[in-house]
Each structure stands twice: as structure tokens, then as C-alpha cells.
Image (tube, grey):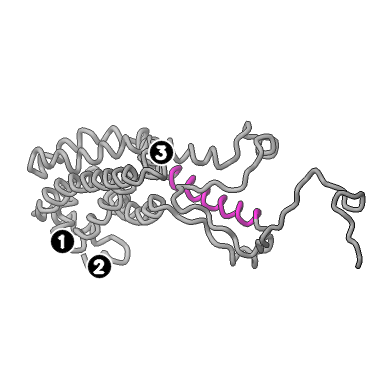
């Protein structure tokens, strides 16, 4: 009978590194990034490599894009506070569209002057959106690089990084905010050269003319906006359910309910003043009403039916 050499002999030298069998992992089935991350972290880049390749002082581009998005949202919150006060809280207190319009004219110079509007409204909003899109594109670039997808044909089959609920709400909010800004700010500037006459009375007139369409559109804007603002702020402050330890199930549930309750409260307050008072203010009479009708009729595509 043949004798096999003993493992202790020289024919089987003992290695200082233990070997073990691993399951194969094909590169054409990328592993999904965690869905509960606002912007999931990707391949690790050593700080030295990032600094030398990008010249960013030890941080990669994701670090800076996330901070640009974070602090631009803080700046835009200043405008949001003014806007909710003018379109909801003041109408609730005065119970009158005409009286609320007077306060609106007093506060408009703080965020609609040629100097303040670009820095308080336009630039933070565009920066917030642009950095979010750039982060998403860069995350996809990282995935393609990680899994060796070099050609355009290969990248067509690469899955996009998963979206968090907050990020998804932001993309839904984008066309709603764009339409709102166009009707109430861009359209009067385009037709009349000035938007000072497009106040709460102009919005009330639109509700009276548009009926259900106006209420549905503004309700969607308010609900989606409130959820995005509350959950986005909680994410920046580290107050989302995912910041609670995974074993604290009840704590995560309480955090989830608290944030949704805060979102509902914010949306409810906004709708009480915006829809309950301004939305039911009625159409304007005389030459003012005719001027409002002319403005609404100039909305592209749908203006002819308004």
C-alpha cells in the first residue's frame, strides 16, 4: 500500500498563511448599495490618493459635494421661512387675502430684490439640485469603475445607485417647484416686466379660475415639499431612524412616527393658510381681474384653457 507523506515532512511545508475556499462572485452581478443611505458610500479611496489625484486636501469629491448640498439647503431655509410666513401664517392670522398682501409687499425686498434673490433663493436652490445630481452621477461612475464596466455598452446595463425616500421626494418636488416659480415669478416678469403685482390676490384668482386642478397641484407641492424638508433636515442632523441602533426597534419606530407627524403638521399648517384662506379668496374684479386673466392665458400649452 502506498504511503502518503506526512504533512509534517518537507514535502508538505507548513505555510504561515492559512488558505481557505471562497465562493465565486461574478463581476456581472453588482452588489446593491444600502437603500437606507442618503448617498451610499462606495469604493474606498485612500486619502493620499484622493488628495494627489483631485487636489482636495485628503477628501474625495463626494465629501465636498455632500457638504455643498447640505449648506445650500440651510441657506434656502431662510427663504422658506419667509415664504411659509407670508403664504400661510399671516393669512391665518389676518383671515384676509388683501391684508396679507400688504405684509407680503413689506417682506418681499428681503428675498426678491436684485441683490438678495440670487443669493437667498436662486443660487442655493440651483446648487442644491446640481450637487445632488452630480453626486448621483459620480456614484454611478464609481460603481462602473468598481465592477470594470469600461465601454458604453457595458454601462448601459449597470444599475443606478438606489434612491432614498428623501432623495426621491426631491426629484418629485423639482417639477412642482419649477412650475410654481414660473407662474408666480417668471411669467409676470416675462409679460409685464415686473412681478410686484403677482401677490396672494393673483394666487387666489388662479384658484378661482382653475378649480380642482389648482387645489390638487398646490396640495402636491405642499405635501411633497414638507416631507422633503423635514426628512432632509433630519438626515443632515443625524435624526433619521437609521441613526438609531439597529437593535432598538421601538426607538426606530418612534423616530419614524415623529418625523412623519412633523411633516404632516408642517403640511397641515401650510395648507390651512395657503388653501383654506388664500385658496378660497375668490377671483378679482374689474381691470385687476382682467390683468390676472391675461397673465394666466400666457402660460405655455395650458394657458388657452385657463
Q: Main secondary structure of the magenta part?
A: helix
Does residue 119 appear left or right of residue 201 in this picture?
right
Does residue 79 appear left or right of residue 144 in this picture?
left
Callout 2 secondary element: helix
Q: Which residue is mark 1?
A: 209
Does residue 294 appear left or right of residue 151 in this picture?
left
Q: Residue at x 49, y 52 (%)?
A: 34
Q: Is residue 192 visible?
A: no
Q: Residue at x 51, y 48 (%)?
A: 40
In the image, residue 296 sits, relative to residue 199, either above or below, namely: below
**Count of numbered badges drawn on the protein:** 3
The image quarter containing residue 78 is: top left
Q: Residue at x 55, y 42 (%)?
A: 62
Placement of the C terminus among the 4 image quadrants: bottom left
Q: Earlier in the sequence, mark 3 or mark 2?
A: 3
Q: Is residue 158 visible?
A: yes
Q: Which residue is mark 2?
A: 304
Q: Earlier in the sequence, mark 3 or mark 1?
A: 1
For the magenta stretch, what is the residue range? Answer: 127-146
Q: Residue at x 15, y 45 (%)?
A: 273
User: Can you give x and y, in whole percent of width and height, for residue 193 in the image?
Assistant: 30, 47
Q: Are marks 1 and 2 in contact (CB under 8 Å)?
A: no
Q: Identify the mark at residue 236; answer none if there is no mark.
A: 3
Amino acid at each position: 500500500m502506498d504511503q502518503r507523506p506526512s504533512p509534517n515532512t518537507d514535502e508538505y511545508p507548513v505555510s504561515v498563511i492559512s488558505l481557505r475556499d471562497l465562493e465565486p462572485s461574478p463581476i456581472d452581478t453588482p452588489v446593491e448599495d444600502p437603500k437606507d443611505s442618503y448617498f451610499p458610500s462606495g469604493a474606498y479611496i485612500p486619502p493620499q490618493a484622493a488628495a494627489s489625484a483631485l487636489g482636495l486636501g485628503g477628501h474625495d469629491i463626494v465629501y465636498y459635494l455632500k457638504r455643498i448640498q447640505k449648506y445650500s439647503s440651510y441657506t434656502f431655509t431662510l427663504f422658506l421661512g419667509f415664504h411659509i410666513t407670508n403664504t400661510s401664517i399671516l393669512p391665518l392670522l389676518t383671515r384676509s387675502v388683501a391684508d396679507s398682501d400688504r405684509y407680503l409687499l413689506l417682506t418681499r425686498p428681503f428675498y426678491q430684490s436684485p441683490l438678495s434673490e440670487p443669493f437667498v433663493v436662486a443660487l442655493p436652490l440651483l446648487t442644491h439640485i446640481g450637487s445632488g445630481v452630480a453626486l448621483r452621477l459620480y456614484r454611478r461612475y464609481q460603481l462602473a469603475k468598481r465592477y470594470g464596466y469600461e465601454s458604453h455598452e457595458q454601462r448601459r446595463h449597470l444599475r443606478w445607485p438606489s434612491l432614498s425616500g428623501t432623495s426621491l421626494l426631491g426629484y418629485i418636488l423639482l417639477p412642482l417647484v419649477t412650475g410654481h416659480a414660473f407662474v408666480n415669478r417668471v411669467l409676470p416678469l416675462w409679460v409685464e416686466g415686473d412681478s410686484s403685482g403677482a401677490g396672494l390676490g393673483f394666487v387666489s384668482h388662479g384658484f378661482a379660475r382653475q378649480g380642482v386642478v389648482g387645489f390638487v397641484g398646490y396640495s402636491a407641492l405642499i405635501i411633497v415639499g414638507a416631507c422633503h424638508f423635514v426628512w432632509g433636515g433630519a438626515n443632515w442632523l443625524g435624526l433619521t431612524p437609521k441613526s438609531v441602533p439597529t437593535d432598538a426597534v421601538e426607538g426606530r419606530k418612534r423616530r419614524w412616527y415623529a418625523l412623519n407627524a412633523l411633516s404632516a403638521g408642517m403640511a397641515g399648517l401650510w395648507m390651512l393658510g395657503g388653501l383654506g384662506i388664500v385658496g378660497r379668496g375668490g377671483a378679482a374684479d374689474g381691470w385687476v381681474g382682467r390683468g390676472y386673466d391675461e397673465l394666466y392665458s400666457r402660460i405655455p400649452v395650458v394657458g388657452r384653457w385657463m
